[in-house]
Image (cartoon, grey):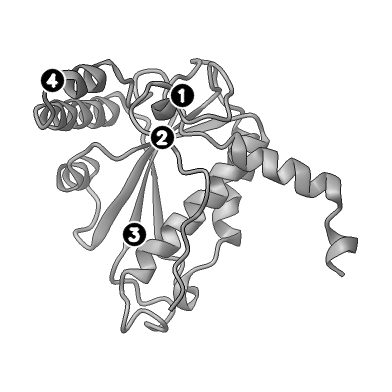
Amino acid sequence: MQDQAFTDDFRTQFDLLMRLRRDVRRFRTDPVDEAVLTRCLDAFLLAPSVGLSEPWRVIRVESEAARDAALKNFQTANSDALAGYSGEKAQLYSDLKLSGMQEAPVQLAVFCDDTTSKGQGLGAGTMPEMRRYSVVSAITLFWLALRAQGLGLGWVSILDPDQMNTDLNVPDNWRLIGYFCVGWPEEESDTPELERAGWEDRDETLPIEVR
């Protein structure tokens, strides 16, 4: 049944898709077709979620005021992060481009509703963080859907989440999972930018322990 559903060519292309799913920070400013973006966002509707709770909450950040507030949030947090490094590492950090917020045509803030009643609490009683993991799973599907359309996504996590909640006027029980820049990448690569910049190396094998 598996061979009938997915060919070797499909599996090869899927492997390529995962390899090209890089965190993008360098975007062209060309607009994104709304129909294409909607198809990609529909990946959230296919995502798994604990207890079928679908706890993701998506805010499209479009106004100049909201984008300026988000950018200021990043710039402040980024300056604080830089202060935590010294010497060569500080210089390397300062040279990194860590967000595409000034160029990306589409920007989204994705939250988890930690107190949603949907799902009746199934699976979240002992591990309430499963709701947040569910949101991350949905984001991953969205990411792959974007890449399949030639679009890129950049996940901005250098932010003050409480300030983001305030600036976007969202409920107190929503927790920021990430701020996302979406658009057309300036280039494609199967190597993470942080690896190319010499910040860190990717493991070549997965360490697995046995008990």
Residue 50, image x, y percentages: 45, 74
User: In the structure shown, which secondary structural element does the residue marked by tag 1 occupy?
Assistant: loop
Farthest residue to the front: give it: 210
Which residue is the site of mark 1?
105
Q: Is residue 27 above or below residue 81?
A: above
Q: Amino acid at mark 2?
A: Asp
Label 3 SS = strand
Labels 3 and 1: the sequence-earlier one: 1
Q: Position of residue 180 (x, y in %)?
A: 40, 37
Q: CA distance from mark 1 to mark 2?
A: 30 Å
Q: Residue at x 55, y 23 (%)?
A: 184
Between 145 and 55, the one nearer to me in the picture: 145
Residue contact at pointers 4 and 3, CB within 8 angstroms: no
User: Is 17 placed above or below 121 here?
Assistant: above
Q: Quadrant of residue 172?
A: bottom left
Mark toward the start of the polypeptide (4 vs 2)? 4
Mark 2 to mark 3: distance in Å?
Answer: 31 Å
Q: Which of the 4 image quadrants contains residue 185?
A: top right
Quadrant in the rendering for residue 70? top left
Q: Horizontally, is 131 left or right of 10 in the view? A: left
Residue denoted by label 4: 87
Q: CA distance from mark 4 to mark 1?
A: 35 Å
Identify the mark nearer the N-term, 4 or 1.
4
Q: Position of residue 175 (x, y in %)?
A: 26, 56
Which residue lies under the disc numbered 3? 112
Question: Which quadrant of the rendered structure holds the C terminus?
Answer: bottom left
Mark nearest the camera among 2 and 3 is 2
Viewer-nearest residue: 120 or 5? 5
Q: Amino acid at mark 3?
A: Cys
* Kind of residue sitting beneath label 1: Pro
- The residue located at (68%, 44%) in the rendering is 15
